[in-house]
Image: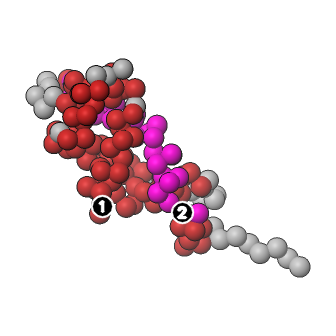
Amino acid sequence: MADDRLLAQYPKQDTVRDRNFSALIGWSVTIISETIPTTKPDEEWVRERLVAERIPVQTANYVDRTMSYFMQDDVTQTNIRQFLNPWNDEATEVSLSAQNELIIDRFMPRFAKTDVSDEQVQAWYDANGFAAVPLAR
């Protein structure tokens, strides 16, 4: 477990915010570039897709809103000194980037569930040709 004093510095450090900003943009680009399935995707996929579409235009907002998700991850807590260090060597920075990708993959389903309403999921289904078919009477 990380030292609480170090964790308290995590959301305050520009270098952390920059890394999380870049990681969220990278995740967003990956998700947005996925082809929409031909069969109806599950709600988790739609929720993550909607969050991914929002991130590029509201990145700073999402950095703030996801900070605690990054902080609570064991990877962050184990490597807190590297995450706080603005002067890591290139190999460490590459490793931290990969770690942030893993962290996002772990928390995004939970985050997206709170960020995207059921109505927004249904609107996405409707807009993308997956509207519910009424039952025949």
Query: Which residue, given by chain and number where applicable, does mark 1 sit on?
Result: 58
Comparing 46 with 36, the one in front is 46
Q: In the image as oriented, which residue stretches furthest toward the left?
A: 87
Residue 117's disc number: 2
- Height in image: 77 above or below 34? above
Q: In the image as oriented, which residue stretches furthest toward the right?
A: 137
Image point (21%, 34%), residue name:
9
Query: For numbered disc 1, what is the local secondary structure?
Result: loop
Task: State the image coordinates of residue 74 (x, y, percent, origin top left).
Answer: 40, 26
In the rendered structure, which amino acid carries the disc numbered 2?
Ser
Image quadrant containing the C terminus: bottom right
Q: Give the range drawn in magenta.
A: 92-118
Q: In this view, does 115 lie to the left or right of 68?
A: right
- Height in image: 5 above or below 107? above
Most frequent secondary structure within the magenta stretch: helix
In the rendered structure, which amino acid carries the disc numbered 1?
Gln
Task: State the image coordinates of residue 102 (x, y, percent, origin top left).
Answer: 40, 34
Q: How far apart are marks 2 and 1 (CA)?
A: 18 Å
Q: Is residue 18 magenta?
A: no
Count of numbered circles in the view? 2
Q: In this view, does 15 lie to the left or right of 34?
A: left
Mark 1 residue crowding within 10 angstroms, few (<14) / some (14–19) / many (20+): few
Comparing 45 with 85, the one in front is 85
Residue 35 seen in the figure: no
Image point (42%, 51%), residue name:
31
Image quadrant containing the N terminus: top left
Task: State the image coordinates of residue 4 (x, y, percent, origin top left).
Answer: 29, 27
